[in-house]
Image (cartoon, grey):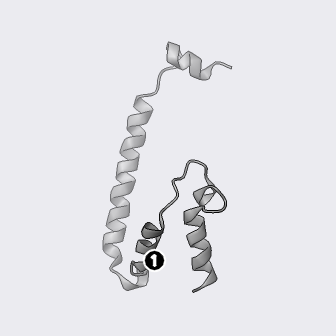
Amino acid sequence: MRYCVVRHVGFLLGHSHGRAAGDTAAVPQTIDEIVGLLRRPSPWQREMGQVYADLDALGEQLAARKAELMNDRPSKSSSAGERRFAR
C-alpha cells in the first residue's frame, strides 16, 4: 500500500492524534467509511459529468444556506446583536 494512502487514512481517522483532519470540530470517519472511500473508482475510472453536476448542486445549496443564515443574523441594534458585538 502506498504511503500517501496510509497517511490519508490516518488523517481521516484522527486516531492517535485525537482529531480528524486536524480539526477539533471534525467528526472522525470510521474504518468502514474509509474502506468504502477506498473502494470507490478513482476519478479517471468514472464518468465525471455526474460528479461535476453534484458539486454544482452542492454549491447552490451552500449559497442558499449562506443567504438564509445572513438574513437570520441579529442586527447590531437588537439586544442579541448588542451582546454579540459587545466587547
Q: Residue at x 36, y 60 (%)?
A: 56
Foreground: 5 or 53?
Answer: 5
Residue 37 shown left or right of residue 17 in the figure: left
Residue type at numbered disc 1: Leu
Above or below, 53 relative to 47: above
- Residue that mark 1 sits on: 38
**Would you call the spot at circle 1 few (<14 residues within 10 Å), some (14-19), or many (20 or more)?**
few
Q: Secondary structure at mark 1?
A: helix
**Tag count:** 1
Name the quadrant of the N terminus.
bottom right
Residue 21 picture location, percent across and down: 59, 59
Where residue 76 sits, quadrant-wise, is top right
Query: Foreground residue, 49 or 3?
Result: 3
Q: Position of residue 45 (x, y in %)?
A: 38, 85
Question: In screen coordinates, is 64 left or right of 70?
Answer: left
Residue at horizontal 40 percent and vertical 38 percent from the top: 67
Left or right: where does residue 79 sit relative to residue 33?
Answer: right
Specify the quadrant that holds the C terminus. Answer: top right
| Of the pair 41 and 86, the residue shown nearer to us | 41
Residue 5 lies, in percent from the top left, at 57, 78
Give the residue at x 61% y 52%: 23
